[in-house]
Image: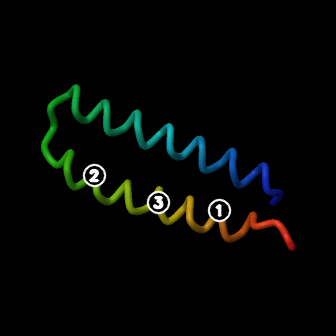
Amino acid sequence: MTQKTYLRLMLALTMVYGVVIALLTLLQTGGVGVAAIVGGVIVGLGWALTGVLTKRPS
């Protein structure tokens, strides 16, 4: 995978995460807080991993 592929994948996953949280909130389902925390951690780790994997050589 190239640098652009990782960045596009993470951008797509972040957008899906935002839509899922928004839908859960609009539908007033329980567990939105837990979903937000777990998803936030996963998305954050994904962005951190993307930063490490796509780091340009010096």
Instruction: Look at 60% across and 68% down and name the residue there.
Output: 49
Nearest the viewer among 45 and 55 is 55
Q: Quadrant of the C terminus?
A: bottom right
Q: Can you give x and y, in whole percent of width and height, for residue 15 in the image?
A: 50, 37
Which numbered mark, 3 or 2, is in the foreground of this view? Answer: 3
Query: Which quadrant would residue 22 be assigned to in this image?
Result: top left
> Which is nearer the N-term, disc 2 or disc 1?
2
Alpha carbon distance from label 2 to label 1: 22 Å
Amino acid tagged 3? Gly
In the rendered view, does 28 fall on the left or right side of 20?
A: left
In the rendered view, does 24 fall on the left or right side of 19?
A: left
Label at residue 9:
none
In the depicted structure, whether residue 26 falls above or below residue 9: above
Label at residue 50:
1
Instruction: Look at 65% across and 48% down and name the residue there.
Output: 9
Query: Which quadrant would residue 18 be assigned to in this image?
Result: top left
Q: Secondary structure at mark 3?
A: helix
Amino acid tagged 2? Ala
Nearest the viewer among 5 and 27 is 5
Instruction: Look at 17% across and 49% down and name the residue there.
Output: 31
Instruction: Look at 78% across and 49% down and name the residue there.
Output: 4
In the depicted structure, whether residue 40 falls above or below residue 45: above
For disc 3, the marked residue is 44
Which numbered mark, 2 or 1, is in the foreground of this view? Answer: 1
Q: Can you give x and y, in whole percent of width and height, for residue 53 in the image?
A: 72, 69
Q: How is the image coloured?
A: rainbow
